[in-house]
Every structure is written in C-alpha cells, then in structure tokens.
Image (cartoon, rainbow, N blue to C red):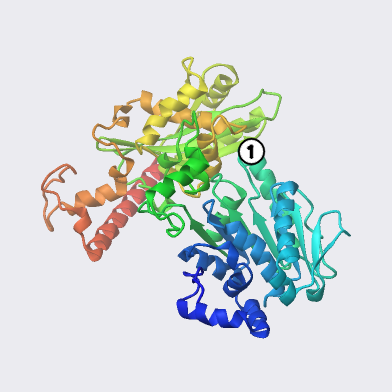
Amino acid sequence: MMTNTFNGLLTDEEWAVLEKVIKDPVLRKHAAKRSFALFEAIYFGEYFTRPFAPFHKEFMAIAEDQERKFYVVRASRGFAKSTILNTHYAIWAILGYQQKKMAVIIAQTLEQAQRYMAKIRHELERNDLLRQDLGPFHESGEWAIPSIVVDNYDARIAIASVGSHVRGLTHRHHRPDLVILDDVENLDSVRTRENRDKTYEWFVSEVAPAGELETTKFLFLGTHLHDDSLVSRVVREIEKGGRNGIVRSYPFLDERGEPLWKARYPDQQTVEAFKQMIGDEAAFERECMLRTPAESGQIFLPGWVREFEASQHPGFAGWTRFRETAISVDVAGSKETSDYTAVVVSDVWRYEDHMRIYVLEAYNVHLRFQEIKVFIQELYEKHRQRTQSLPIVLTEAGGLQGWLADELKNIHVNAVERSAGGMSKEDRGRVASGPMQKGQVWFQRGGIGIDRLMEQLLGFGRERYDDEFDAFTQTVLYVKENNFSAFTIPGYEIADSIPFPAEAELARKASLKPDSNQTAQPLSDPQKKDYSQLTEEERKNLEHEEDLRLMRESEERRMIGLSG
C-alpha cells in the first residue's frame, strides 16, 4: 500500500479506497469531478510529498463552496495557495461538477499572469492521466490575450493583468463565472493612496461588473501588503456585510509561535531556514505573518492606534472632566485658489490625573477662502451646540492661516493662532507620537474621515498628502503645551490601563455603599469596590442611574440656555 501523503485531507481508510478507485477509469473520473480533494489526489499527487495541514482542507472547502460570491484567502508564502487555489482549482472548476465556462486569472502584471497560464498549460499538455480522462485541450490564439479552450467542455481559461479591460470578456455567450485574483498588488502599487484608489476603482469598474450577478465567484489570493490595499478593502466590506463572502487568514506561525504547517516545518531549524530564505524581517512579517511591519523612519505605528465606538464616548456627564473641543485647521493654497484644507475635530477630556484626546472627525475640503470661513463657522456652531461650550479653533500663526484666525475672531469664533516654533513636520509628528503611543489619543471608529487620517499618520513620508497629519499634530501639541502636564502619566506604560471616563465613573459609584450619603472616594481609594466583580444586573442598574443623571443635567443645561 502506498504512503498516504494526503494525510489531513484523506483518512487512511479513504486513501485505501482511493487506491482502488484510481485503477478503475470510470470510478476515477467520477470521483475526480465530484471532489476537489480527490481531484488533487488523483492527478496531482506527486506535488505533495508531505502530509497536509488542516488549513489545506479549508482550501479545498473554499474551492468547492458556491454559496458566496467573494472569497479572500490570505496565506503565508510557501503554503501552496497558488498551486492549489489558482492552477489546480482553475482546471477543476471547468472539468469538475461546477462546470465553469469562463475562468479569468488576474495578476499584477501580464508577465506574472502568463506564468500562471504556463503552469496550467503544462498540466493540460503533460499530465497524461488528466488528458486521458478529461481531455483533449488546446490553446486558442483568437484573442489579443492568451487563453486556453477546453473544447469538450465548451469552456475557456483566460488571463489578464491589473488595469486591463476585463469587462466585456466572454466565451461565446458566457461571461466570466470564475475570477481568480492572485497577488494583484505589490509594495509599489500600495505605497500611496492614489495608487490604492486607482487599483480599487479598476476593480469596481472593470472586474466586479464583468461577471454574472448570481453565479460569478471571485477568489482573492495573496498576503497582507497594506491596511488599505484592494484586498484589505474587500475584507472590510465583507466583514461589514457589504459583500457576500468569507475571509480566511493563515499566517506562518500561530498565536503560540508554532508553524501552521507542522509537517513541512517540524522544528525550529526548518523555521529558521525558511526565515533565512525570506531574508528580510519586514518581508517575513508582511508576507508570512500577514502583519503590517513598521517601515524605516515611520513615526506613527499601527499598534498605537486605539479606537472607540461612538457609544463609548464619555458624553458630557461632568464639566470638571470635559476640557474643550479643538477644531484644528490646516489651510492650503492661497486666497484665490481652491486647494484642499484639512480640519480635525477632537474632544479633550480630563479624568482625575488622566488626559485624553478623542478624535471625532477629519475633513479634507476643497473650498475657496471665504467658503473655508463659512465651513469652519458652521462646524464651530455644530460642536458648540453639541457640548454646550465654546470650542477652540486652532490655526498656525501668520500668512493665510493667521488671516483666517482674524476673520473668525471678527465673527465671534474662538480662534487661536499657534506658532510651529520652527519645528519641521517630522519633528512635530515625533512629539505628537508620544501621547498616541501611551494610549492618550483615541479615534472614533467609523467617524467622518478617520480612515483617511489614519492613512496619513501611518503613511507619513510615503503618502502624497499630509494636510490632516498637520492638523492632527497641531491639536496634540496644543494640548501638551496647555497643561496639560497630565499628558505624561507616570506609571502608565500601556494605553489600555487608562479607563474610559464613563467606565471609571461607574467604578467610582460602585465603590459607594448602598443608601449611604458618604462622600465619593477617588478611584485610587483602596476601599473601592472592584468594578470587574459587579454582576450584570448591578452594572445595568448603575448604567441606568448614570443615564438618568445625564438626562437631568442635559435638560438643566438646555433650560439655562433658554433662560439666557
């Protein structure tokens, strides 16, 4: 009996049955059409000399699944994702029970796509058992792009590259019903937002409409190159329910540091040999661990980004804690032109000795000078009403920005000019990065323009635009300069140790005994009740009590405003 190299996909009993099936042409052909795993075992067994990993079984399941429209598989280099889910699946999708009629394989460049096609052609021409059972096949030269026609299945496999015209491709009356996008991006193509937007626009305008609405299957294969790459955007759309699909990620090492494909990398020596083959730590992080590595000279790192949901905002429960709303403006261009102006809106909060900035919104507006003034005035009024307090508008001193500050003061907007003090953009960024690293800056998930602001912060020096970077750093420097000694918190080395104010207020209330009139003790009081030990019912009661108090205070402020 042959060794079961498909251990992980087939049990020993299934392997024994397969050995008998392989000897019977009729059973062999039927089994190969019904099961992608058996198709691999029968026609491509020589490719696999080591037992499979569990994730390879998931590869097979993804290939066979037809319940969804979009599939994203991000896997480490060396995991055979392209061999299985590109070369072999493209063939089986046509020859097997799925009966695809028009498969299109897309790569970053046409040269890369041609290599994919060469591998498929090699199998169709040189795999004798495959040709005997499911052939014949021949190559067609009727198109400007290479393709292979499988006559007895009335099907075609074609290739394309990023940026090419895909919409409109057909085989007879069949539109693409399988589109495999394999490594369609590289480091250069994801380096700037312009390039990322261009790739995404090409996908939504050329690729996504190319197929049939109900039947076309899109399969993305690759690693993790950028948080805003085409693949990352599709992942977010799937996770938010915007696209019907699934996402699977398979890093080289699991959370315990063990290789995910243990049979191929059984010990530390083979792991180290693989890392040496990759040769670069950043490349290993990106292409094998599927994480965005810190680049040389990067000021803000992805691990420093803390997000909060709108529901977690502390609200305005205590005037001693809310400091102010800062509207930071970076005016671009001149009075006559209509360049982009960046605006970042943040709430500044203090709780005991803790200081935090909650970044709420970021704008990049294309307005003339007088329109900018109106836009800032409207934004100012919006947040004045929201907080029942006067926001502060921050601009740089001198020039057009100073002029804007004067104009805003003339219409009773609380505007302040700040001097950059001769600091370069990079220096300002490095100073502002300290509070962000310590977790004193939080960003509202889903807030207006927050994703774009994140791109400018994390991509400073690579991204074409940095106006919102300037507006953000201006806010942080202002907070540091104006007290804000609380912005360096002794003993707090990690951000998550600083509680949200609303949660801390509930913790303080939990420290009081029921039906007691005693004065509230500070959170540092050793006699306070451990908030983490509250039952769900106790927490809900406290939250309800807090909600009632907030409603009363809000109504009091509203009445004061009316009487004024």
> Residue 409 location, x and y as percent?
51, 24
- Observer-nearest residue: 397 or 71? 71
Point out the image quarter for the C terminus.
top left
Q: Is residue 420 above or below residue 38?
A: above
Identify the residue under disc 1.
188
Residue at point 40% right, 47% down? 269
Q: Residue 498 sits in which quadrant?
A: top left
Residue at point 47% right, 29% down? 473
> Residue 117 location, x and y as percent?
73, 57
Label 1 sits on what residue type?
A: Asp
- Observer-nearest residue: 233 or 142? 142
Q: Is residue 292 left or right of residue 512?
A: right
Q: Is residue 202 left or right of residue 427?
A: right
Q: Pointer 1: residues within 10 angstroms few (<14), some, or many (20+)? A: few
Residue 563 makes an appearance in the image: yes
- Provide the secondary structure element on which disc 1 rests: loop
> Residue 68 location, x and y as percent?
60, 69
Q: Residue 91 sits in which quadrant?
A: bottom right
- Observer-nearest residue: 491 or 272? 272
